Amino acid sequence: MEIVFVHGAGSSADFWHWQPEAFPGARYVNLPGHGGEPPLPGGASVEGYARWLEGYVAEEGLEKVCLVGHSMGGAIAQQVAVGKPWWLWAVVLVGTSARLRVSARLRDTLREDYPAAVDLIVKWSFARPEGDLTYAQKVRRNGTRKQMLRTPPEVTLGDYEACSRFDLSGRVGEITVPVLVLSGA
């Protein structure tokens, strides 16, 4: 089975920095506009990213694929799954949903002050521990911040706007492959 990891909004394949040790033969894609790749023609959308991912799988000649998607990457994996491609065998959804809501505050901040928006994203993306952050927690948050700041602001804004339009809540029952959902408080 081929495993393809799909990152979330404003991120890149570098998001999966711990996974290659456990999944050395897996593929870690950079979506269009991310990680130095050219942007998606026509602007960002979950549907457009899903079509791009289907094209990637076809171009690479992959069969028996398990898609692992985080956040927007999970939305993309769900969008692919409702299309029932013959090559899709399983889906792993990490910290995502069938509907992704994005606050107007975050979208406005992405337009007006990208570093401040990234700080909000990082703050909202990690659990709030009791007490002070450990050194490892600070490093993890800082690494996520640095990685997101490498993504062009217009790409991240487009991603979050695409997420705010995404809603497969009425169609998840159409997914027929095995699905593992990973989430936490």
Image: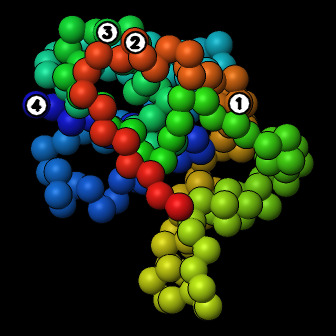
Quadrant of residue 170 in the image?
top right
Q: Is residue 109 above or below residue 43?
A: below
CA distance separating discs 4 and 1: 32 Å
Q: In front of the other: label 2 or label 3?
A: 2
Q: Is residue 79 above or below residue 11?
A: above
Please name the residue that numbered disc 3 is placed on. 84
Q: Left or right: 144 with respect to 91?
A: right
Q: Mark 1 or 2 closer to N-term?
A: 1
Q: Mark 2 or 3 closer to N-term?
A: 3
Name the residue type under label 4.
Met
Please name the residue that numbered disc 4 is placed on. 1
Q: Mark 4 or 3 closer to N-term?
A: 4
Dot 2: few (<14), some (14–19), or many (≥20) neighbours within 10 Å? few
CA distance separating discs 2 and 4: 22 Å
Picture coordinates of residue 120, whole percent (x, y): 73, 60
Please name the residue that numbered disc 1 is placed on. 164
Q: Mark 4 or 1 closer to N-term?
A: 4
Residue at image coords 53%, 61%: 185
Dot 3: few (<14), some (14–19), or many (≥20) neighbours within 10 Å? some
Are circles 2 and 3 on residues that touch, CB within 8 Å? yes
Nearer to me, 109 or 85: 85
Residue 146 can be seen, yes or no: no
Please name the residue that numbered disc 2 is placed on. 174
CA distance separating discs 4 and 3: 17 Å
